[in-house]
Amino acid sequence: MTVKEMADKLVAWIREKVKEGGCQGVVLGLSGGLDSAVVAALCKRAFPENSLGLIMPCHSDPQDASDAELVARRLALPTKTVVLDRVYDALIQALRGSPYVPGERSLALANIKPRLRMTVLYYWANELNYLVVGTGNKSEVTIGYFTKYGDGGVDILPLAGLVKAQVRELARYLDIPEAIINKPPSAGLWQGQTDEDEIGLTYAVLDNYLLTGEAPPQAAKRIEELRARSRHKRQPPAIPPF
C-alpha cells in the first residue's frame, strides 16, 4: 500500500466511524507532537468544516503550544486553547493537602494531566456532537505507553495500526512541518521527559520488533514484559465469569 492509499483509507475510515456514531465531526488534542499533527491532518481531510483541535497546556513547555499552533496554521484547523494549570494545581492541593511543586517527578501526578485533557475533549465532543479522536500509534498502544482513561480515553484511534516510523512517513506525505517531524517524541509529563528514555527503548528497535519479530534478546524481553503488563489497558474492565 502506498502512503497516499494509506492516507485515503484512514480518512475514509474516520468518516465511516463518525457516521456510525451518529456524530457530526471530530475533536482531538493538539499537543505539538508528531502523532497529533498527523491525526489533525487526517481529520481535516475527513471533515474540512467540522474538525476541532484543542490545545491544553498543563504546566507544559511553551514550545509545545507554539508547535501545536504551527500545525494548526499549516492545516487551517480551528483550535481552542484551554489552560489547565490552575485546575491541576487545585486538584493536587485537594488530593494531598500540599501544592504542586514545579519540576516534581511523579507518575501518579503526571497521569492526572492527560486525564484532565480527556475531560476537556469529551466536554467539547458532547457540546458539538463530535467523536474524540485519539493519537496513539501501534508502538505505544502495544506496550501500554499511554494513560488509562487519559490519552487512552478516546472513541477512535486511527494510527493504532501504524508503528512510529510509518506515522513519520505519513507525516511527510501530509506536509507536516519538518520541525514537528524531527521533534524528539515526548508525552510532556515533566520537563525534559522523552518517550524513549521513559520506555527504555528506541522507537527504531520497538518498531522493528513489531514489524519483523526481531530485536536484541533484552529488548525483545522488555517489549513482551511491557505488552503483558499493560494488557488491562487495551481491554474493557474485567467482569467475573458468573
Image (tube, rainbow, N blue to C red):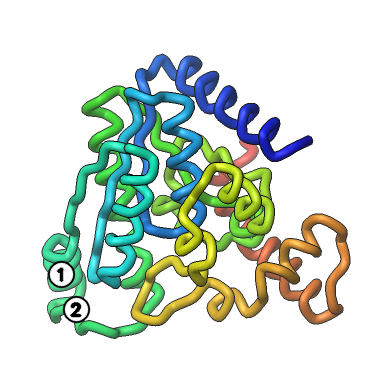
Q: Quadrant location of the N terminus?
A: top right
- Residue 89: assigned label: 1
Q: Residue at x 86, y 61 (%)?
A: 213
In this rendering, would 204 be left or right of 32?
right
Q: Which residue is mark 2?
A: 100
Q: Earlier in the sequence, mark 1 or mark 2?
A: 1
Q: Residue at x 11, y 64 (%)?
A: 86
Dot 1 falls on a residue whose secondary structure is helix
Kindly identify the amino acid type of the residue bearing the numbered disc 1: Asp
Residues 169 and 204: in front is 169
Q: Residues within 10 Å of mark 2 (few under 14, many from 20)?
A: some
User: x, y percentage for residue 198?
Assistant: 54, 77
In this rendering, would 111 be left or right of 199?
left
User: Could you tell me if the residues under marks 1 and 2 are in contact, i.e. CB atoms within 8 Å?
Assistant: yes
State which quadrant residue 48 falls in. Answer: top left
Kindly identify the amino acid type of the residue bearing the numbered disc 2: Tyr
Q: Residue at x 66, y 74 (%)?
A: 202
